Amino acid sequence: MRLSVLVAGLLVVAGCRTMPTVEPVATVYVVRHAERLDASNDPPLSAAGTARAEALADSLDRWGQPEAVFSTAFVRTRETARPSTQRAAASLRTYGGTPDAAADARALAASLRATLRPGHRALVVGHSNTVPVLLNAFDGGTRPDLNHADYDGLYVVTLRDGRATVRRVRYGVDDGVHDPR
């Protein structure tokens, strides 16, 4: 009897304590498409690119698959997004398509900032010239275009209280993926 009274008393005291809360953030994962087969206008992914797209999905399995996936209409971006889209059971949404790719990237950033809710995640697959524009639209940075050989950058955009922070981590087939948190 005494023990049950003591336990009940502790539960009441514990319930009265104010626990610090961690405010959830919204997260946008941004990547450049994986390695393409050739330099033609709209090529599919190479074998290395297909493996990298799977590695991206593996990374997002650990970090949290996105609820929304965005890609340009190019084959290489859609193929990069496909494994993550399938694992997340999300639909692939196409963005862009106007002659002004930079404006399309800025518009997507504004839309995600306005609509992505805390605790939710999105994946955006872009190009060497649109990934920096998108990131700069989130945090006001001045990043230049990506190097054409840069395929292992995974940019983690954290949105909290109207502010964005951007971190770059590496992902890929055999490069020791690190948790971005």
Image (tube, rainbow, N blue to C red):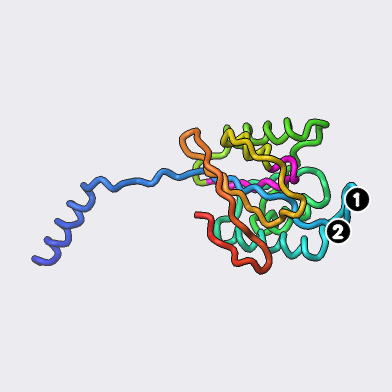
143 with respect to 167 (left or right): right
Residue situated in front as seen by the camera: 19 or 143? 143
Residue 108 occupies quadrant: top right
Q: Position of residue 79 (x, y in %)?
A: 78, 55
User: Is 121 covered by the magenta stretch?
Assistant: yes
114 with respect to 131 (left or right): left
**Residue that appears at 83% across and 61% down:** 46
Q: Dot 2, how many residues are within 10 Å of its Cα: few (below 14), some (14-19), or many (20+)?
A: some
Kind of element beneath mark 1: loop
* CA separation in Å, label 2 and label 1: 8 Å
Q: Position of residue 39 (x, y in %)?
A: 88, 52
Disc sitting over residue 49 in the figure: none
Q: Amino acid at mark 2?
A: Leu
> In the rendered structure, are the residues bearing label 2 and label 1 in contact, judged by CB atoms less than 8 Å apart?
yes
Disc sitting over residue 37 in the figure: 2
23 with respect to 169 (left or right): left
Residue 58 occupies quadrant: bottom right
Residue situated in front as seen by the camera: 180 or 73? 180
Residue 127 occupies quadrant: top right
Residue range highlighted in magenta: 120-131
Disc sitting over residue 40 in the figure: 1
**Residue that appears at 72% across and 54% down:** 150
**Residue that appears at 53% across and 55% down:** 180
